[in-house]
């Protein structure tokens, strides 16, 4: 046992009320001193185990998708396996994003299929090698970050167009037919294909789609366990097993002998067409890989240990080397893949070893599982790829580009890719994006209006030097000494417009007038004055302009307000500062009404009409440092919060006259129908410190009577038969943190004893979650339970969207 426990003899006496002890010289568990490193060997084992399990999860996803993408392009089915293996081993080893998984991707399907149709397979392999060489050149020139300048609307439109093309083509195979090379040809042939359905192919396709849809939605604990198996693997395996048992006659995967596998040949065909093909493959591979690497960085931003930020130039070099090897070995072109990368991160991978191991498993499967793979119906693979294509037309992306007024760029890119091709569609999208940007810069509407003695100058659009003459005319319509409001509804102001606005403002203030600068919806904006007086001379605005805090600080205990002054202008001493709490409360309310209320009024009005419909009950400590909405990124109406000293859940009937916690639990479960209950403990909990230092006997104050509900947690920690709750990657810093963790586990057991909770758990409509928040590190941990005990795993930041199709 570490020396930190015997320093609290009162805690030991308190815990031994039932004859148990926390510390024992023969006990193997220990709490190490703060900042002491954990033992090296167990940590190394955990890292290896995490990478191994993650590699298996990624392999199970990659295997059916690689075959499906090869089928969709018309390439030999082995080419998908070659690309997956090379992407894992070569790109995984050389790339600059350790946790990104590379392989055949849906975004490359259309371009590759067009290449094969026009030039044949061997030339396609040669084009893949040339594209890899081009990527190596771009990586050496260190231009990787230039790809991030491409408008998201163009990228999303390109993926949507590819998705539509894939879905329409694979629909023919799903119905038992053969697809054409062009989207319009496939659409024209669809009525005839519908008239000649093949029941066996349709039934296997329907079974595959049904499993893809249902598997991720299996409820309850059983579903939580089953969902660890990838839906794509389950769907293809289910259709293959059914087809084999039923003896259905339908086309199946055909993997010729590796001895007859076609390798790359010299490129054939017109030089200009080959160059365009190389450019297309390079563009799609590079953009998809680099954007995927950035998204992976966002997913692992809060991890510990952190694998490090991606080196985008190195990632481009790694992708180029992988494409050279894949093309030379007769594999498909490859890129970083979102679905596999996301699965890799979510499975707990901590290094590039997981990506490389997944490539090794693909090699093993390609050599030893050929008889099994040849049982897969082509209709099942086509249904899987068709589902991926449909998912590429993301409603989330459409809403995003609509909100940013880029739907025209998205639509033109999508239609261009569908009707003309990937390179042509992207070129059209870039042209439209540039035209729209220039139009927005040039189109600025400026109006002047007078209402109730105040003069309003409204600017709609971007303020550039082109709009300065019109801005100057509108501002000079405001009489000297009048109250003026300048409303800036735009996101850009160049230096010429800024100088013009500041010169007029300085002059108008000197003539006794007032100026208020606002943004969209009337929110105030801060434009730094060039030595001029405050933008608005009322007291609140002066305080706001003096405050240099960032937008996230209104909840923080900051001291932006100017210090109180005593008569004569000197800073006030402690005796002069009367009623600071009331003043602070009034200032906070005033700031809310001025800055926040206009932004949330519509949402709160909706909640007032509809009533509260929270998704979870959040039971946490009353500690003032725990801001539930901040650490859960939730808004009004999302959480039903119950706070008490020590985040305790008394057992039913144990509150002796105060059933407030039990009543809140019953109301949340039976009336509000919450889907989950979270018990959240935190570091430095005063209630847990009080439990450890309390002496037996003495006066039973209200606090001591309440803390008796925490005694089971203290006894649980003292029980040598039970494994301690622990934090992934490190030991608890001291006995207080160990008790905080144990208390979360114990209170979850208390929750299960409540009748309403037990009933909902039995019905599968409720789940319980444990959470620990380290205040000093601003780090959240979620509880997982295994055979080895209760483990709190670190939760990382995941701002990126890796849910786009593979």
Image (tube, helix red, strand yellow):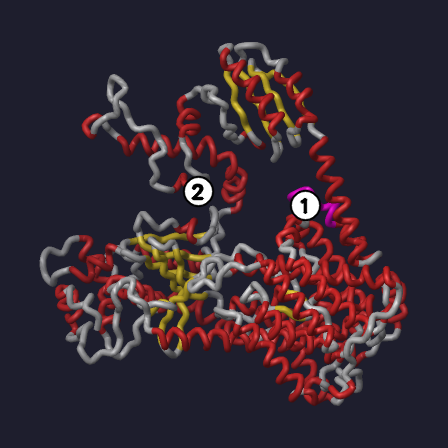
Residue 507's quadrant in the figure?
top right
- Quarter of the figure that contains the N terminus: bottom left
Q: Which residue is mark 1?
A: 402
Specify the quadrant of the image occupied by residue 587.
top left
On the question of residue 392 being in view, the answer is: yes
Q: Is residue 409 magenta?
A: yes
Instruction: Please state the horizontal and vertical placement of residue 383, each as a whole percent of the image.
Output: 73, 72
Report crowding for label 1: few under 14, some 14 to 19, many 20 or more residues within 10 A (C-alpha): some
**Highlighted magenta segment, given as a residue range:** 401-410
Q: Which quarter shows the C terminus?
A: bottom right
Viewer-proximal residue among 43 and 251: 43
Q: Main secondary structure of the magenta part?
A: helix
Q: According to the image, label 2 marks what residue?
A: 552
Magenta run includes residue 504? no
66 sits left or right of 613 in the view: right
Residue at horizontal 46 percent and vertical 30 percent from the top: 594
Q: Nearer the viewer, mark 2 or mark 1?
A: 2
Above or below, 108 against 638 in this view is below
474 shown above or below 397 = above
């Amino acid at each position: 046992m570490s020396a930190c426990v015997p320093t609290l003899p009162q805690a030991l006496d308190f815990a031994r009320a039932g004859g148990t002890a926390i510390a024992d010289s023969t006990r193997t568990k220990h709490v190490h001193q703060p900042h002491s490193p954990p033992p090296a060997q167990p940590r190394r084992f955990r890292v290896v185990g995490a990478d191994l399990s993650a590699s298996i999860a990624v392999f199970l996803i990659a295997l059916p998708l690689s075959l499906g993408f090869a089928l969709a392009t018309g390439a030999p089915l082995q080419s998908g396996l070659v690309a997956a293996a090379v992407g894992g081993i070569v790109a995984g080893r050389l790339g600059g994003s350790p946790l990104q998984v590379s392989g055949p991707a849906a975004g490359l399907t259309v371009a590759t299929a067009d290449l094969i149709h026009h030039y044949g397979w061997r030339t396609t392999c040669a084009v893949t090698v040339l594209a890899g060489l081009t990527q190596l050149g771009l990586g050496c020139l260190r231009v990787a970050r230039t790809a991030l300048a491409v408008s998201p609307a163009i990228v999303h439109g390109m993926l949507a167009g590819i998705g539509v093309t894939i879905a329409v083509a694979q629909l023919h195979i799903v119905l038992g037919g053969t697809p054409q090379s062009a989207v319009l040809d496939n659409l024209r042939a669809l009525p005839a294909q519908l008239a000649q359905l093949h029941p066996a192919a349709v039934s296997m396709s329907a079974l595959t789609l049904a499993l893809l849809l249902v598997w991720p939605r299996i409820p309850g604990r059983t579903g939580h366990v089953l969902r660890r198996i990838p839906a794509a693997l389950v769907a293809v395996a289910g259709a293959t097993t059914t087809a084999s048992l039923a003896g259905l006659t339908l086309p199946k995967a055909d993997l010729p002998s590796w001895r007859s596998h076609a390798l790359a040949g010299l490129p054939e065909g017109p030089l200009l067409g080959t160059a365009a093909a190389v450019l297309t493959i390079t563009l799609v591979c590079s953009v998809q890989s680099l954007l995927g690497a950035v998204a992976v960085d966002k997913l692992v931003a809060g991890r510990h240990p952190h694998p490090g930020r991606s080196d985008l130039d190195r990632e481009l070099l790694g992708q180029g080397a992988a494409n050279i090897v894949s093309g030379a070995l007769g594999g498909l072109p490859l890129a970083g893949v979102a679905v596999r990368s996301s699965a890799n991160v979510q499975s707990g991978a901590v290094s590039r070893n997981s990506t490389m191991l997944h490539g090794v498993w693909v090699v093993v499967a390609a050599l030893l599982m050929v008889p099994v793979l040849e049982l897969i119906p082509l209709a099942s693979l086509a249904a899987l790829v068709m589902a991926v294509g449909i998912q590429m037309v993301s409603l989330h992306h459409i809403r995003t580009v609509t909100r940013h007024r880029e739907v025209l760029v998205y639509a033109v890119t999508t239609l261009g890719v569908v009707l003309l091709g990937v390179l042509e569609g992207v070129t059209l999208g870039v042209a439209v994006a540039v035209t729209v940007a220039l139009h927005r810069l040039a189109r600025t509407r400026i109006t002047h209006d007078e209402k109730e003695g105040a003069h309003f100058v409204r600017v709609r659009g971007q303020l550039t030097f082109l709009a300065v003459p019109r801005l100057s005319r509108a501002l000079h319509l405001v009489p000297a000494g009048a109250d003026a409001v300048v409303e800036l509804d735009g996101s850009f102001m160049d230096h010429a417009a800024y100088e013009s606005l500041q010169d007029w403002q300085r002059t108008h203030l000197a003539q006794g007038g007032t100026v208020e600068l606002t943004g969209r919806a009337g929110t105030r904006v801060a434009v730094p004055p060039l030595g001029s007086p405050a933008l608005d001379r009322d007291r609140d605005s002066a305080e706001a302009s003096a405050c240099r805090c960032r937008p996230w600080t209104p909840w923080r205990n900051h001291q932006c307000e100017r210090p109180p002054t005593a008569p004569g202008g000197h800073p006030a001493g402690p005796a002069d500062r009367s009623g600071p709490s009331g003043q602070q409360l009034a200032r906070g309310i005033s700031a809310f009404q001025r800055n926040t209320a206009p932004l949330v009024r519509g949402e709160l009005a909706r909640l007032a009409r509809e009533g509260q419909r929270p998704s979870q009950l959040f039971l946490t400590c009353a500690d003032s440092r725990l801001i539930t909405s901040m650490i859960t990124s939730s808004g009004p109406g999302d959480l039903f919060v119950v706070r008490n000293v020590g985040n305790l859940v008394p057992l039913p009937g144990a509150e002796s006259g105060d059933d407030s916690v039990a009543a809140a639990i019953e109301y949340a479960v039976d009336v509000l129908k919450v889907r989950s209950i979270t018990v959240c403990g935190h570091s430095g909990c005063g209630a847990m410190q009080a439990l450890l230092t309390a002496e037996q006997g003495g006066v039973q104050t209200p606090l001591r009577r309440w803390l008796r509900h925490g005694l089971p947690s203290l006894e649980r920690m003292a029980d040598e038969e039970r494994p301690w709750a622990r934090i992934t990657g490190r030991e608890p810093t001291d006995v207080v943190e160990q008790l905080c963790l144990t208390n979360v586990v114990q209170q979850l057991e208390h929750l299960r004893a409540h009748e309403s909770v037990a009933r909902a758990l039995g019905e599968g409509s409720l789940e319980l979650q444990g959470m620990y928040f380290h205040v000093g590190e601003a780090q959240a941990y979620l509880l997982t339970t295994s055979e080895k005990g209760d483990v709190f795993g670190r939760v990382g930041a995941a701002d990126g969207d890796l849910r786009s199709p593979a």
